[in-house]
Amino acid sequence: MIKGNAIIGQSGGPTSVINSSLAGVIEGASRSDAIESVYGMNYGIEGFMQEKIIDLQNQPDSVLKGLRTTPGSALGSSRHKVKDEDFPKILEVLRKYNIRYFFLIGGNDTMDTINRVEQYCKNEGYDLIGVGIPKTVDNDLFGTDHTPGFASAARSNILNVKQAGMLARDMKKVDQFVVYQTIGRDSGWLGAATAMAKKNDDDAPHLIYCPEFDFDKISFLEDVEKAYKKYGWVSVVCGEGLKYANGSAVSASETRDKFNNTEFGAMGGASVGLNLHRFITENFGFRGEFQITESLIMSDMSRASELDLEEAWQCGLEAVKIAEAQESGHMVSIIRISDEPYTIAFGKALLKDVAVKAKPMPMKYFNHEKNFVDDSFYNYMRPLVYPLPDFVELEKKYIK
C-alpha cells in the first residue's frame, strides 16, 4: 500500500452538501493507515499550483462537525481548466508535499482534471491515487444514480415553485402567468423536479421545458393558451439551457466559460425566462411575473435534503475506502437498488467514463408533449426530496 499525504479540493459551483462530502473525506483520511496528513486546496487546482494548502487534519472538532451542515465551498472553489503546461507544476507540488492521495469533489470537468493529473503522474513514474467524489446540482454525471447536491437544490426549486404558484394563483386577476427559470445547462433534472410541487391538477407548475428538447415558440404559445383556458392562469418552468432546433440558445447569450460552455449567468442568462415572458405578453397581452434564482438554490441550507447531506458525507468516506484499496482512476457512485423502500449501495465508476460528458434525463421521464414529466419520474424523485410541506386552500363556499 502506498503511504503519503492526501490533498482534497473542491471545484465548480457549490452545493448545500459539498462540505458534508469534504467532512467525510477528512474523517476517513484521518483514520487511514495509508494517509499520514490531510491537506486541502485553497481555491482548487488553481490554488494548489500556488501552494495555497490548508491543514485539514488539525481543524477544531467544532469546525469538522459543522462542515456537515455548512453550505458553499469551505475550501474555496475554482473553474480553472488544467492546461498541458500546468502539469509539471502540479507534479512539483505533489512531490514537495509527498502527496500520494488526490481527491477532488466536483462535476464532470472536475473528473476530467483528476483523470488527466493521474495519467500524467503515471507517465512520469509518480505513484498517485486519484479518486473523485461526485457533486453537481445539475444531476448530469454518468455512472451514478444521482449526485450529492441535486436533491437539495431540487428541493429548493420545488418549494420556490410551490409557493410562487400559490402567489400567482391568488393574484391571477392581476397577473395571469409566472415564469420560473432554473439553472441546468445541458439537462432538465432541476426543472423537471419542480413537478413535485404539484398536489392538485391546478397547482404549479403547469408547463416545464427542459434542454433535452428543442424549444419551439409556436408549440409553447399553444401550450400556454391551453393551460390558461383550463386554469385561468399559467405557471411555466424553464431550464437555462433551452435551445431552438437550429442550436441557438433561447437565452441569446454569446458568452462562454473556460470550458467552452455557454455562460447562462450574469452576462445574459436571465434572458431565457425574460424571453418566454415576452413571448407570452406579446402574444396574449397578459401581465405576468418572472422569477430567476440563479445560484441561490446551490447553497440553500435551510431547504437541504437530510438524505442528501447524509449521502454526501458517505460519499466522502467511500472515496477514502476506494483510495485505500489502491483503486485509482475512479469516482464514487451511488447505485439505486429500490425506490420503495429507498435502498442504495455505493460503487465506483471509471473517471474516463464520467469526465466532460453530461447525462441528460432519460426520455422515459418526460410526457409525450415534452412539456411535463411522466408519472415514473415521481418514483425517482420522491425519496430524494420528501417530506415537503403541505399547504391548504380555502373551500369556495360562497354565501347565497
Image (tube, helix red, strand yellow):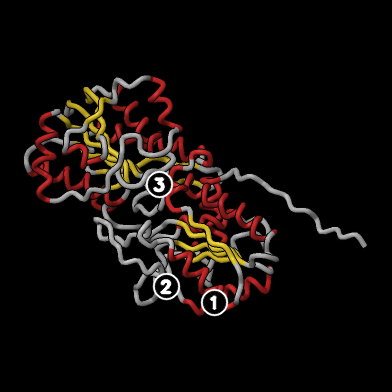
In the image, which disc is placed on residue 214?
Answer: 2
Around disc 2, counting alpha carbons within 10 Å, would you say few (fewer than 14), some (14 to 19), or many (20 or more)? some
328 up-or-down from 287: above or below? above
Question: Badges 1 and 2: C-beta atoms under 8 Å apart?
Answer: no
On the rendered structure, is 276 left or right of 251?
Answer: right
Q: Amino acid at mark 3?
A: Thr
Q: Looking at the image, which residue is at 26% across and 39% down?
A: 43
Around disc 1, counting alpha carbons within 10 Å, would you say few (fewer than 14), some (14 to 19), or many (20 or more)? few
Asked which secondary structure carries label 1, the reply is: helix
Q: Looking at the image, which residue is at 11% across and 50% down?
A: 84
Q: Quadrant of the N terminus?
A: top left
| Residue linked to disc 1 | 282
Residue 285: x, y in percent?
A: 60, 76
Tell which circle, 1 or 3, labels the residue nearer the N-terminal end.
3
Q: Amino acid at mark 2?
A: Asp
Q: Could you give the CA–CA distance between mark 1 and mark 2, rounded to whole angstroms?
A: 21 Å
